[in-house]
Amino acid sequence: MSTENSLESLRSAEYQQRQVVNQLRRDVFSQADPAASEEKMAALQAAEAQLIDLEQKVAEAEGRGPRRSGVLGAESTGLVASIALRMAQVPTSIYHLLDPTKNPLLTCTVKNASGEIRRVRVISYIEGYTARSVDSAELDPGVEESFDMLPTIFPESVKNLTELSRATLNVLIQDLDTDKVEIHRTYPVWMLAHSTAPLAIRDPKSGGWTDMTPYLGAFVTPNAPDVMNFLHEAIKFHPEKRFIGYQVDAKQVEPQMHALFDALKDHDIHYVNSVIDFSPDTGSANQRVRLPRESLANRSANCIDGTVLFASLLEAISLSPAIVIVPGHAFLAWESWSGGTNDWKFLETTMVGSADYPAAAASADKTAQHYQELAKKDPSRFRLHPLRVLRAQYGITPME
C-alpha cells in the first residue's frame, strides 16, 4: 500500500472513530445524570483511547512539520522570504485578547542572503476587517528575522458576523533600500462567527493544535446588566436574603450556591445537552456559546452556556469559579474558600431542570474524579480554568 493510500485509510478510520466517540458522548452527557452509568463511561473511555491512537498515527503519517509558502530565491533578490499562516480560522470573538507572540495569525521569515546590510518592512492585514500590522528590521548579512503578526481587528467589522465567512489576508514584504515589494501575497481565510468560541485552533505551520479553552473566560460576564438584575431576583432564594461571597466563614458559601441553583431552576431554564464537537477537517474545534444574558432571556443553554452563566453569577457575588473542560463536556467548579486554596467543588449545570442541588453536585464530583484519574496520563482529559487565573495571568476580560 502506498504512503498516500495508507494516510487516506488512517484518516478514514480516524473520522469513523470520531463519530463513534461523539455518539458515545451524546449517550453519556444527554442523561439526566451524566455520571449515572459507569458502563457507558467505560465504553466512552475505551473509544476515546482508540481515537487518540488513530490521531497520533495520522500525525505521524502526515509527517507534520513547517509548511511555508512564498519563498524567494537568494539569487534573484538577495533576500529569502517565506510566509506561514498560523491559524486555519480567525476566532473573531476572542481575537482581540490574543498575544501575537503566542497566537499569531501569521509568521513571516526574512533572511539576508546578500553581502550588504538590508532593511525590510513586513505588512499584513485582512481586507475590511483589520488595521495594517507593520514591522521592520535591519538585517546584517546572513541574518534571519521572524515576524509574528496579529493585525488589530476592527470591532464593528465583526460585531454582526453571524456566519462563517471568507476573507482575504494580504501580506507584503518590502525592501526599504530599493522601495521594491519582495512579496505581495493574498490568502483566503475563514472568519468565525462572533458568537463562536474556538476550543482549539490548528496551526497550519506545524499541523498541531492550540488549546483555546482558557478564552471561554471571555464569555463569563459578571457585570452584564442582565446578570446583575437576575441576582436581585435570586437573592430571595437565600435563607438570609443576601450574597456575601467569602465573608464570615466557609459555611456561608454553600447556601449561596444552593440559592443560585434554585433561582435558575425557578427561572425555568431548559438545558439542551449537546456535546462539544471537534472537527479537524475545518481547522478548528468550535462551539456556539450563548452569552449569559442570552441564556437568561431564551431560558435555554447547553453545558458550556450553563457553565459560563453560573460562573458569571459566582464572579458577580465575589466567589471564585472555574470552567472545567473534559472530552465532549463542560461543567462548573468553585473554590470552597478564598485566597486561592485550590480546594475545588463541582456542579453539573445541565441538571438544573431535572434534579436538585445535592444531586447535581454529586454527579459533577463523580465526573471530575473520573477525568482527573485519566488526566494523570493525559492532562488534556481534565482542564480546570480558574477565572481568577484567566483574568490576572491571561488578561482574559469579559466580552461585555
Image (cartoon, rainbow, N blue to C red):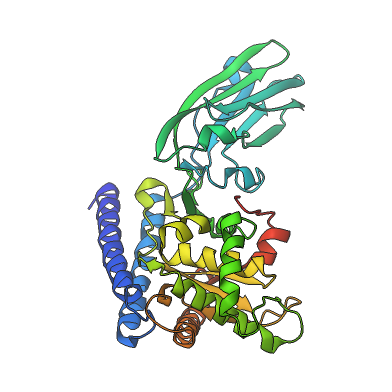
- Say left or right for 337 vs 366: right
Residue 33: quarter of image = bottom left
- Say left or right for 73 vs 135: left
The front one of 36 and 399 is 399
Q: Is residue 356 above or below residue 198?
A: below
Residue 6: quarter of image = bottom left
Residue 176: quarter of image = top right
The front one of 182 and 78 is 182
The residue at the point 71 percent across, 76 percent down is 244
Q: Is residue 384 above or below residue 170?
A: below
- Say left or right for 330 vs 138: left
Q: Is residue 310 above or below residue 123?
A: below
Q: Is residue 99 visible?
A: yes
The front one of 141 and 248 is 248
- Residue with the most extreme left position: 1
The front one of 178 and 127 is 127
Q: Is residue 177 above or below residue 200?
A: above
